[in-house]
Amino acid sequence: MAAPELKPTEIKLDPDKLYVEEIFTDRRIGTIRRLSPVTRDGKADAARAVLYIGETQIMTPAGSIPIAFEIGAGSVGEAAEKFGPLAKDAIDRTV
């Protein structure tokens, strides 16, 4: 009996939901990713909100575990101020 033919999975970016990504870090605790929406031609898209994503990691006996969480903020400074408590909450949920 022949093996069934596998269908290729379609991998496609949505050109109407693109973001420019910038990374900010203190080189100690973690990073903040600022995702700024852009149009298909790469220009700023004022119709969508800028997103902030915090990232850190925890060490376990099996190795490091990445932790990512959304930060509701209006600026990178505000995101940095909110980073600690939100990271702790994300770590607690993971553990």
Image (cartoon, rainbow, N blue to C red):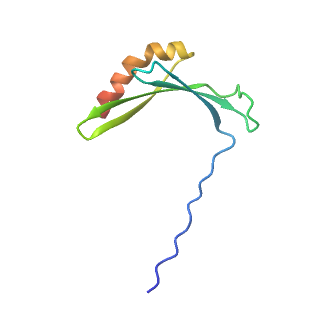
In this view, the residue in front, 14 or 30, is 30
Query: With 53 as the anchor, is 62 left or right in this view?
Result: left
Q: State whether residue 95 appears in this view.
A: no
The percent coordinates of residue 7 (x first, y second) are 55, 68
- Quarter that holds the C terminus: top left
- Residue 57, quarter of the rendered image: top left
Please, is residue 18 above or below residue 69 in the view? Answer: below
Residue 3 position within the rendered picture, expressed as x and y whole percent measured from the top left: 46, 79
**The N terminus lies in quadrant:** bottom left
Q: Is residue 78 left or right of residue 87?
A: right
User: On the image, which quarter does residue 39 sit in?
Assistant: top right
Could you tell me which residue is drawn at 71 percent across and 29 percent down? 45
Of residues 6 and 22, which is closer to you in this image?
22
Name the residue rendered at 63%, 33% in the picture. Answer: 19
- Residue 90's place in the image compared with 17, above or below, is above
Judge whether residue 9 can be spotted in this image. yes
Q: Residue furthest bottom?
A: 1
Where residue 44 appears, x then y in whole percent?
72, 27
Farthest-out residue, left: 61
Q: x and y percent of residue 88 in the render?
A: 33, 22
In this rendered view, identify the residue nearer to me: 21 or 18: 21
Residue at 69%, 40% in the rendered image: 16
Q: Residue at x 70, y 25 (%)?
A: 46
Q: Is residue 41 left or right of residue 82?
A: right
Residue at the extreme front of the image, as rendered:
27
